[in-house]
Amino acid sequence: MTKKLLIVGAGTGGLMVANFVARDLGREIARGEIAVTLLGDREEYIYQPGFLYVVFDLMRPAQLRRPIRELLAPGVEFVHDRAVRIDPQRKVVERAGGEELAYDYLVLATGSDLNLAEVPGLQEGGHWFYTLEGALRLRDTLRDFKGGRLVLTVGVPHKCPVAPLEFTMMFEEWARVRGIREQTEIVYTYPLGRAHSIASVAEWVQPELESRGVRVETFFNMESVDPAKRIVHSMEGTDFDYDVLVAIPPHRGDELGATSGLAEAGNWYPTDRGRLNLAGRDDIFALGDTTNLPVSKAGSVAHFQAEVLADNLVGLLSEGSPPAYQYNGRAFCFIETGLERATFITFDYLHPPQVPQPTSAVHWFKQTYNRIHWANLKAVM
Ligand SMILES: Cc1cc2nc3c(=O)[nH]c(=O)nc-3n(C[C@H](O)[C@H](O)[C@H](O)COP(=O)(O)OP(=O)(O)OC[C@H]3O[C@@H](n4cnc5c(N)ncnc54)[C@H](O)[C@@H]3O)c2cc1C
């Protein structure tokens, strides 16, 4: 009988797991012993880290998009549809189209989504660069920007924890290059009592921002936005009026988990921090943004988890051997510190990050990665 691996979500984590497994088990797939199916609700993959560059006219949208079918390793079957319910007893996933897909092993890689409705007025009064449409709208606003007050707010949880910092430092240099820095006030707000959730990053970045004339306002949890008066209110009672509000909206997981009774608050899947199986189940796994793990929601995390999960799935599918590999919390994030310099952080469950001096070499490394990300997805690197 054919052993069936079903992966839901054709983003960074889902594509990598499917491709790693299919490259390792190509012969078994060709003989019909194993089937790898990827179920995704979009036909196109979008490289989200590129949104930051679209805002400043440094990348074109076309550079960020590829048809998913072009990114698949031989042997992966792609089904374009939405998963609407999981039945763990019958081991099937129901599609929006009504059909069911059976599995022996199920991988959930459904990512995270913006929860704009959580902040009244944000949709009408704010900008964000966490979707391609949002990045393009902000790009158009900035093209006409002649100065004024830009306020950045950060909702929790959210993916790519360093992107708000990158945006702020890139915007500050962009305003200088455009000759409008003196007419521009930048306010960076953060919901905690320091400038970033990671202590070493906060320690490094607060003086860095202040030395560039950026006002840092901590303990600012965005509560609502008044689009008519252009004021953003916080739960703490601090308000800012703004000319441009750039928000990192709070995120939530896809409703599939809640509909199926498998996810907890926020639609995040309770996931084992090492083996990545769902709590109490040995046939369902989760990776990437959709887990409840205490790690950054980042593409690098999805990548490192995909390597571990794929190794374990190869063992399970080909020999029935129990999962032997453990994810150790590894994460890697580039941090753009302006338009031509960058640094990076790397950390895991046991080792917090240090922030090296920014250099132009790291900036160019990130630029290169932005263009070779596709090879990573195809699992050829
Ligand atoms: C502006 C920005 C900058 C970023 N910068 C970086 C960076 O520099 N470095 C970094 O490591 N990360 C960065 N990230 C984060 C990174 O893009 C995400 O963490 C990563 O894509 C998560 O991978 P994933 O597989 O969990 O989810 P995704 O890649 O988001 O994929 C989830 C997929 O599942 C699909 N899906 C959801 N629900 C269903 C369903 N019910 N049925 C079928 N399909 C479904 C979605 O449509 C999507 O295609 C950035 C993100 C943004 C927005």
Image (cartoon, rainbow, N blue to C red):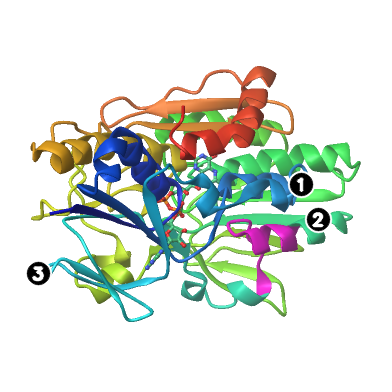
Identify the image quadrant of residue 339. Answer: top right
Q: Secondary structure at mark 3?
A: loop
Q: Are marks 1 and 2 in contact (CB under 8 Å)?
A: yes
> Which residue type carries mark 2?
Leu
Mark toward the viewer: 3 or 2 = 3
Disc 1 marks a residue whose amino acid type is: Phe
User: In the shown orientation, is residue 83 left or right of residue 146?
Assistant: left
Q: Which residues are magenta?
A: 125-138
Q: CA distance from mark 1 to mark 3?
A: 49 Å
Q: Residues within 10 Å of mark 3 (few under 14, many from 20)?
A: few
Q: Position of residue 370 (x, y in %)?
A: 62, 36
Q: Which residue is mark 3?
A: 89
Residue extending furthest front? 31
Q: Nearer the viewer, residue 54 or 199?
A: 54
**Residue 187 image position (x, y, % from top left):** 66, 50
Q: Which residue is rendered at x = 26% and y = 51% of the image? A: 35
| Marks 3 and 2, how far apart at CA | 52 Å
Give the quarter of the image for residue 239: bottom right
